[in-house]
Amino acid sequence: MVLADLGKRITSAVSELAHSNVVDEKVFDGMLKEICSALIEADVNVKLVSGLRKSIKHAVNFKELPPAANKKRLIQKAVFDELVKLVDPHNEPFKPKKGRSNVIMFVGLQGSGKTTTCTKLARHYQARGFKACLVCADTFRAGAFDQLKQNATKAKIPYFGSYTETDPVKVAREGVDKFKKEKFDIIIVDTSGRHQQEKELFAEMVQIQQAVKPDQTIMVLDASIGQAAEAQSKAFKESADFGAIIITKTDGHAAGGGAISAVAATRTPIVFIGTGEHMLDLERFAPQPFVSKLLGMGDMQGLVEH
Amino acid sequence: AFGFFRNIVGGKTLTKADLEKAMTAMQEHLSKKNVAREAAVQVTESVEKSLIGQKTGSFQSIEATVKAAVEASLRKILTPTNSLDLLREIQTKRSGSSKRPYVISIVGVNGVGKSTNLSKICFFLLQNKFKVLIAACDTFRSGAVEQLRVHARNLKELSEREGGVVELYEKGYGKDAANIAKDAVAFGEAEGFDVVLIDTAGRRHNDQRLMSSLEKFAKFAEPDKILMVGEALVGTDSVQQARNFNAAFGNARTLDGFIISKCDTVGDMIGTLISMVFATGIPVVFLGTGQNYQDLRTLNIAWAVKLLMS
Ligand SMILES: Nc1nc2c(ncn2[C@@H]2O[C@H](COP(=O)(O)OP(=O)(O)OP(=O)(O)O)[C@@H](O)[C@H]2O)c(=O)[nH]1
Ligand SMILES: Nc1nc2c(ncn2[C@@H]2O[C@H](COP(=O)(O)OP(=O)(O)OP(=O)(O)O)[C@@H](O)[C@H]2O)c(=O)[nH]1
Ligand SMILES: [Mg+2]
Ligand SMILES: [Mg+2]
């Protein structure tokens, strides 16, 4: 994610204000306008940006500020808080435990990176001493099972799938039951890509979920997604109630604002980010350092504690 | 959606100040439709320019004027200077003296729908009784070859009765894509295929190494058409994707068209269409509207503009 550009613009908008001699309402509005433009350019949802503008205005409450107040500091803090709020849902993601079966189901739009990421995640847990495996419940996409199989083989992770069965619910159930019996700690279920406009595909997702009863459902989102992110992620949330988000392709050029909007719209934490096409290209995610990075930080870090 | 026109009063000459609010609102409207900000700003600025100095008539006529100006601007972006009739071009080439098949390669970033839309194009060509060779030149992504094998098998079944012929040319994984492409075209020529459709691996447009290999690829495969798949879901990045791919084939070669995929997943937020064409001037050849073989459309500009203005 090239957050640098967005971060630079926000930081410079804020510091421009910090360096101006008079901080009046006009300067304040100018800064807000610049921040909002930068956010929209980064694909943050347009409505969300209007909301953010209002929240910052409300938090600073310029008209009521006592003359002695440290305006600059107040404004900086308000901007920072609102940005953190955008990516920090204050919801703790599920943490798998060893010695029991933890079922994790992947859902998401077509081509977002589910199949690639589920092997990355299995490998991540495997490297940390979990007994991990993969179930291919995508019976729709051409070559889906081969894709998962080849990845799993490369990573030396046991897998389950079928070339002939066309019902993903059945394959998912069989695979999960089998691996549960074999006492796997982490059972990851890959599913087909889908979108909210196709009701049947959503119904199928719910059926798979009912069949495998996942401890955690993860929505995978492409970092380059634009304004459709909010509606799609909300719809997935309503149907599948996913408890975590993974953002993929952050090695691309996109600023990732669409994915951030999905976090805000669903109050769901990002747990990992995908940083490339290879097996090891997966990183843990934490919101505060993310915003710090976003803002080119350092000088604003101190504000978090206040 | 256009409540902002209330500020404009009738019977006066419009100034920049009069239009400021309307233009900001219009920019926001286009942003909501997933038009990249850069494109949205340019569209509204050109509209503003065309309206400053105009005398306002009744309230209604102003609203109509502004909307019409934006509509015209969007229509202008989407209207190609010369339209591509793929079937005619293939026929012309095949009836010429050269035995070389008509070569189309499909490029784009990861996961946008290259292989799927290649298969849809193949279906379309098979319906028109062409003999099509699919070349599996994504030698990197797991399952890429098997994916095309399944499509080739399905398409064969679907078209056998109608007389279309389709085959897969593949050399497995790990090998150089440009070489395979070249060999596939030679094979297609020897075997009398009408069209060779070349699938390529997805690549980030900011990955120097992978992008620079496209130049060699184009040199080796000598495609008649290079089509880029861009997906309707993508936001601002669409502009840079389009620009970088358009510039990747060396000085003498550009993209020939876009396939905008996943249009069925974005409702009326089809701004990517505008962003990619705005960035390059390269026309949209097809829209992907679903995951099945028949889900391929040509662009209806009136439809697109109507959705964008709704
Ligand atoms: N650059 C980059 N590419 C990625 C990343 N994650 C996945 N990809 C690529 O994105 C493309 C699509 O990934 P898949 O894993 O097939 O996506 P999917 O969500 O399973 O797709 P469907 O099953 O068809 O819905 C592939 O080319 C992957 O190599 C990432 O973090 N960075
Ligand atoms: N809804 C919808 N899905 C599409 C469309 N086109 C492709 N897809 C889906 O998008 C996913 C990715 O498609 P692929 O054709 O594998 O994409 P690709 O660009 O070849 O991917 P890589 O080779 O991994 O870079 C698949 O699940 C397709 O079914 C479309 O027009 N609409
Ligand atoms: Mg998949
Ligand atoms: Mg492909």
Image: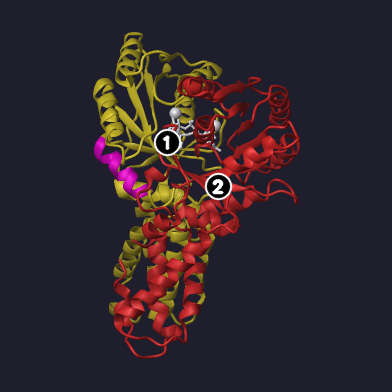
Chain colours: A yellow, B red
What amino acid does circle 2 point to? Phe
* Count of numbered marks: 2
Going by the image, does B97 lie left or right of A261?
right
Q: B108 above or below A73?
A: above
Residue at 37% x, 23% y: name it. A189
Q: Is mark 1 within 8 Å of ligand 2?
A: yes
Q: Tell which quarter ligand 4 is in.
A: top right
Comparing B10 with A57, the one in front is: B10
Chain ID at mark 2? B
Q: Quadrant of residue A196?
A: top left
The residue tagged 1 is: A110
Q: Residues within 10 Å of mark 2 (few under 14, many from 20)?
A: many
What amino acid does circle 1 point to? Gln
Going by the image, does A134 lie left or right of B111?
left
Q: Residues within 10 Å of mark 1 (few under 14, many from 20)?
A: many
Where does residue A17 sit, x and y in percent of width and height? 47, 73
| Residue A298 appearing in the image | no
Which secondary structure is most common in the magenta stretch?
helix
Q: A42 above or below A238?
A: below
Where does residue B88 sit, x and y in percent of width and height? 60, 42
Residue range in magenta is: A229-239
The residue tagged 2 is: B258
Q: A232 above or below B236?
A: above
